[in-house]
Amino acid sequence: MDLQYANVAVAGRRFEIVDTPGFAESRETEEKYRELYRSLLPTADHLVWAVQSHPRVFRPDQEALIALAVGLLERVRTTVALTRADSIGPGDWDRLAGCPSSGQLLSLNEQTENVLGKLSPYLPSLTREDIVPCSPTTGYGLDALIDRIASALPVASAKD
Amino acid sequence: MDKRSFFQDLFKLSQSGKASDGLRRMLGADTTAKLERLVSEERTTNPPKVAVIGKAGVGKTTTVNSLFSAEFHISHALRGTDRAQLKEFSLRGGGSLHVVDMPGLGEGIAEDAIFEEIYRTELPKADVVLYVLEADERLLGEDQRIFTDVIIPALNGQTKRLVVGLNKVDLLGPGSWDTVLNYPDEKQEKAIERRCTDIASKLARQVRGLRPDSIAYYSAERLYRLEDLLIILIEAAGKAAWKLPVNPRPWHELAAPEVRDFVREWQAEHEEV
């Protein structure tokens, strides 16, 4: 099972990022993965929960939240990253400006509300501001994401 | 009348409700009239029923539209069908085809509770059930759950009427869609093959007897392999098979004009009379 570690420095802050294999690949892998995340979460300062921008299937996320909620999630602040914002309908990404078209902005707003509605019953601390649309391949929204991660780091870790 | 044309005419009768002159001469006027009436009555009173199911967003409605040349409203990308929609198609020979477009599963635990109830009521009534998967989606955990918790129990363990279809193969990588031929390129064909093998092994525990080559891969958007999908549906439909229509939209409609014209000419030359 592959956790991947990376050390990064952004705006003078150094932190470690742990990339995980995710959820819901198959029933066979799910329990092992959850076990892994249960041991990982207490060591984290911030949690980025990534979901794609356009899918409508959230049950696996809900089930994973339920499985991890017990005493773990309320202790770590969470950002929900809506990835692949560039591919959301109507699909007319503004290449020149590197940002969503007006139609895509509407869809992203709608999906933000949708995601909030789907996840907040299982993650009560979640607010609209915690949901950040982004598109890693184009760079859109990544600054907002990094700001949130950086602001969540404890002051003590700024020592080096 | 030779055997071959006898069966061809019988087939035409089953599709259109009209017997040929050859058939009439062979069977006599009374028997022919009786047969025509039986076909029409059966088609009208007992239309075949196809249920199209799967996770939210996999292209169920698009599949129904391409397969039966219909134009039903496609759900907005973010919100789908929220109830079982019975769609009625009039068939040429009278009678109709019923297609049940089901709400997608997996949107959420609360929504599923309602939708799964619909599945439990509708699936036992269907002659054939098409479960649609999306090719460019590697997560099968939710599909495994849907099979185990909902579909297999609703079908009473009988998977003979169940067809697993793999939609959107044109978006699968590596490899890419050849827009001139309206066909996958060689790399993409390999990727599709691997995907079918992977799916068959992941779902083997849920759907007994599922083999890579029993997965009907297609692209509703590109009209690719709709005929193959339809044949697999017909094979699975058992006693209702003869009532299913056989003319999906042809794939070459969407190929480049020169390819399209070439195929049309070739078909015109080779068509059986």
Image (cartoon, coloured by chain):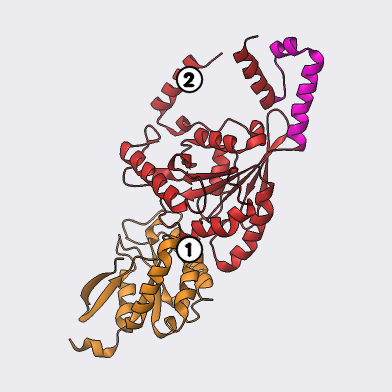
Give the residue drawn at x 65%, y 18%: B9
The image position of residue B140, as x and y in percent, is 45, 56
Q: Quadrant of the C terminus of chain A?
A: bottom left
**Mark 2 crowd level (few <14, some 14–19, many ≥20, 10 Å Cα):** few
Q: Which is nearer the eye, A159 or B155?
A: B155
Q: Which is nearer the eye, B42 or B124?
A: B124
* Chain A: drawing colour: orange
> Disc 1 marks which amino acid?
Leu
Q: Which chain is red?
A: B
The image position of residue B89, as x and y in percent, is 67, 38
Q: Are marks 1 and 2 on the same chain?
A: no
Give the residue drawn at x 48%, y 40%: B214
Q: Is B203 situated left or right of B8 in this image?
A: left
Q: Chain of mark 2?
A: B
In what element is the residue under mark 2?
A: helix
For label 1, the residue is A106
Q: State the mark number for residue B267.
A: 2
Q: Which is nearer the eye, B48 or A110?
A: B48
Residue B31 among those drawn in magenta: yes
Q: Which residues are magenta?
A: B16-45
The image position of residue B91, as x and y in percent, is 68, 32
